[in-house]
Image: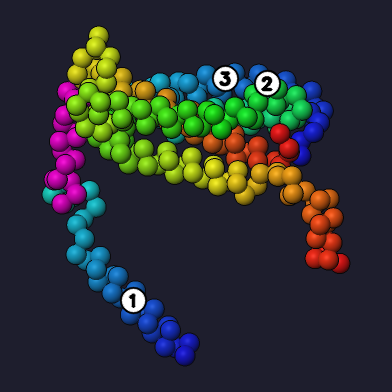
Amino acid sequence: MIKQHYQSIIVQTICSLLIPFIQLFALYVIFHGHYGPGGGFQGGVLLAVSIILQRLYLGTKIAHPKFPPKLTMAFAAVGLLIYGLAGIIPMAYGASFLDYGSLPLFWVHDAELRALGILIVEIGIGLGVFGTLVLIFDNLVGERW
Amino acid sequence: MRWLNALIMLLFVALMLYATVGLPDHADPQAPANVHVSPTYIEDTIEDTHTPNVVTSVLADYRGYDTLGETIVIFTAGLACVLILMKRKGNDKATLSKHHRSDYM
């Protein structure tokens, strides 16, 4: 149980400085997956790490209201739902499962639309991994919420 | 008996080593895995998906079904963790010992 926040001022300052940059780098990893190493899984893990670090140094009493544990399950489920809908919606427009070229975004065309579909799917994966990892951490800590 | 086990293990190792002779060389461009669909993916990825990173286009577009399965696996692992570790009402030590005192004494 992490009831109290960490007493050392060095740890508090460094962690509070570090967390925004970790989150920014996570977003970069997710959105830059088209051009370099990275993608939904890695970016999702980085986002989860930023929240877990916050819980470690602030203690669950202060950190839980900042990011409620009940939201994590919703994030994981919404991520999976985004991926699933990106697969099922093209089927309603006559294409095959997960054919992003037929997503109903009519102002984008073939290859661009497929790139956009990859981005949508990566965001879904990122949300899913993020929610799942924070969820596992919250349950391992074992505090009632 | 122990020697028999060792002999079987050695035979198995020999069989595996023999099987590796038939594998294609490392990074052989004519290997069966490299002439089937990989050239199409590598050549058409810019044209098809406007994605310079072939890994991303294979992972999320050409092989999207596989990645969907991976995401479901991660989500299911999280759900299993919740089900095992979740604090339920009857899961506390106090209530447990109240109800199952005979188990502890």
Q: Is residue B45 above or below residue B36?
A: above
Q: Which residues are magenta?
A: B32-51
Residue A21: mark in rendering: 3
Distance from disc 3 to disc 2, alpha carbons, whole Å, reads: 17 Å
User: Circle 2 — which element?
Assistant: helix
Q: Is residue A72 left or right of residue A87?
A: right
Instruction: Mark 3 vs mark 2: give the one in front.
Output: 2
Residue holding disc 1: B12
Q: Is residue B13 left or right of residue A141?
A: left
User: Circle 3 — which element?
Assistant: helix
Distance from disc 2 to disc 1, alpha carbons, whole Å, reads: 57 Å
Instruction: Mark 2 vs mark 1: give the one in front.
Output: 2
Main secondary structure of the magenta stretch: helix
Please tell me which residue is depicted at 37% across the width and 42% down the height of the picture.
Answer: B69
Please tell me which residue is depicted at 21% across the width and 55% down the height of the picture.
Answer: B25
Residue holding disc 2: A66
Q: Is residue A106 left or right of residue A78?
A: left
Work out which quarter of the rendered image holds the C terminus of chain B and state it.
Answer: bottom right
Q: Is residue B100 above or below residue B18?
A: above
Residue A133's spot in the image, x, y percent?
A: 56, 36
Q: Is residue A67 left or right of residue B47?
A: right
Q: Amino acid at mark 2?
A: Lys
Q: Chain of mark 2?
A: A
Please tell me which of labels 3 and 2 falls first in the chain.
3
Q: Amino acid at mark 3?
A: Phe
Residue B52 visible at all? no
**Of residues A69 and A30, which is closer to you in this image?**
A69
Please tell me which residue is depicted at 30% across the width and 25% down the height of the picture.
Answer: A89
Residue A5's spot in the image, x, y percent?
A: 79, 28
Does residue B46 belong to the magenta stretch? yes
- 3 and 2 marks in contact (CB < 8 Å): no
Q: Amino acid at mark 1?
A: Phe
